[in-house]
Structures are given as C-alpha cells and as structure tokens.
Image (cartoon, helix red, strand yellow):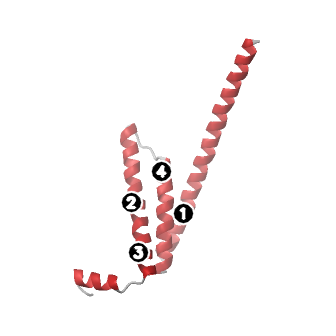
C-alpha cells in the first residue's frame, strides 16, 4: 500500500478530470449533510428537553442520501448502492407520512375555524 503524503494527494488531485472533482464534491457535500442531520436532531432535542426528530432531519437525510447514492453509483459501489437506495425509500415514506399528518392537522384546524365562524354568525343573527 502506498504511503499517504501531501505530495501523493496533490499529484492525485491534479490528475482528476472536472467530472471526477465534481463527483468527489458531491460525495463530500452529501456526507456533510448526512452527518449534520444529527446535529439538527440533537439541537431540537435539547431545546424541547425530550427526544424529537424534526422535519429538517428527514429532509437532510433525503438530500444526503441522494448525493451519496449519486456518488456510490459513480463509484459502482456494490455495498453502498443498495444501502442508500433503501434509505431513500424509507426517508421518502417518512416524509409522505409527515405530510399526510400535516394535512390532517390543517384540515382539523380549518374545520374548527369554520365551525367557530359559523357559530359566531349564528349568534349575531
């Protein structure tokens, strides 16, 4: 195995194409987003003093997974491709459930608002 040195790293980077550099950047950004989602979750938990998983966690999970899956496909990695593909399905499903819950809450609040408005109108007659 070759020794890792700054000279070897610089020589390797100088020989990369623009596409390869872009794919490495996608991989690094994906990894950063994927890792930072835990910071978001930790901060939300600390603020509420109970374990919570904010919506930003799921969006960051999905964004990080899409970028890392793109990088894994570029690398033709037989381990990461199935793993990130499954993650993407799970995160999309969780976001779907969260969206459906949000719609039910909005409908309930709107329904209560309309009922209150109708009651006021009845009282004013």
Residue shown at the point (57%, 52%) measured from the top left: 95
Nearer the observer: mark 1 or 4; the answer is 4
Q: CA distance from mark 2 to mark 4?
A: 13 Å
Q: Give percent across and percent down for residue 22.
A: 44, 75
- Residue 86 seen in the figure: yes
Q: Which residue is mark 1?
A: 88
Marks 2/3: CA distance? 16 Å
- Along the viewing direction, whichever of 49 and 28 lies nearer the viewer: 28
Residue 45, picture quadrant: top left
Tell me the CA gap for discs 2 and 1.
Answer: 15 Å
Residue holding disc 4: 56
Can you say whether 58 is above or below 5 in the image?
Answer: above
The mark nearer the N terminus, 4 or 3, is 3
Are the two marked residues, 2 and 1, in contact with CB atoms closer than 8 angstroms? no
What number is the disc on residue 35?
A: 2
- In the drawing, what numbered circle is on residue 24? 3
Q: Residues within 10 Å of mark 1 (few under 14, many from 20)?
A: some
Splitting the image into 4 quarters, where does residue 32 fall? bottom left
Q: Nearer the viewer, mark 2 or mark 3?
A: 3
What is the secondary structure assignment of the residue under circle 4?
helix
Kindly identify the residue that appears in the image at 26 percent across and 87 percent down: 2
Mark 4 → mark 3, Cα distance in angstroms: 24 Å
Residue placed at 51% from the left, 66% from the top? Answer: 66
Q: Position of residue 25 (x, y in %)?
A: 41, 71
Which one is earlier in the sequence, the residue at label 2 or at label 1? 2
Q: Secondary structure at mark 2?
A: helix
Q: Position of residue 105 (x, y in %)?
A: 62, 37
Pick the residue in front: 29 or 3.
29
Other-residue count near label 3 (Cα within 10 Å), few / some / many at <14 / 14–19 / ≥20: some
Residue pictured at 44% horizontal, 44% vertical: 52
Disc 1/disc 4 C-alpha distance (Å): 15 Å
| N-terminal-most mark, 2 or 4 | 2
């Amino acid at each position: 195995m070759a020794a890792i040195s700054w000279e070897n790293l610089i020589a390797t980077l100088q020989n990369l194409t623009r596409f390869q550099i872009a794919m490495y950047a996608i991989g690094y950004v994906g990894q950063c987003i994927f890792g930072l989602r835990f910071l978001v979750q930790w901060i939300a938990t600390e603020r509420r003093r109970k374990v919570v998983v904010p919506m930003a966690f799921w969006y960051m999970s999905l964004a990080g997974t899409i970028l890392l899956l793109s990088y894994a496909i570029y690398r033709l990695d037989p381990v990461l491709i199935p793993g990130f593909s499954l993650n993407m399905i799970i995160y999309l499903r969780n976001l779907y459930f969260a969206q459906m819950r949000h719609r039910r809450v909005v409908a309930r609040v709107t329904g209560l608002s309309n009922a209150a408005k109708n009651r006021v109108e009845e009282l004013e007659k």
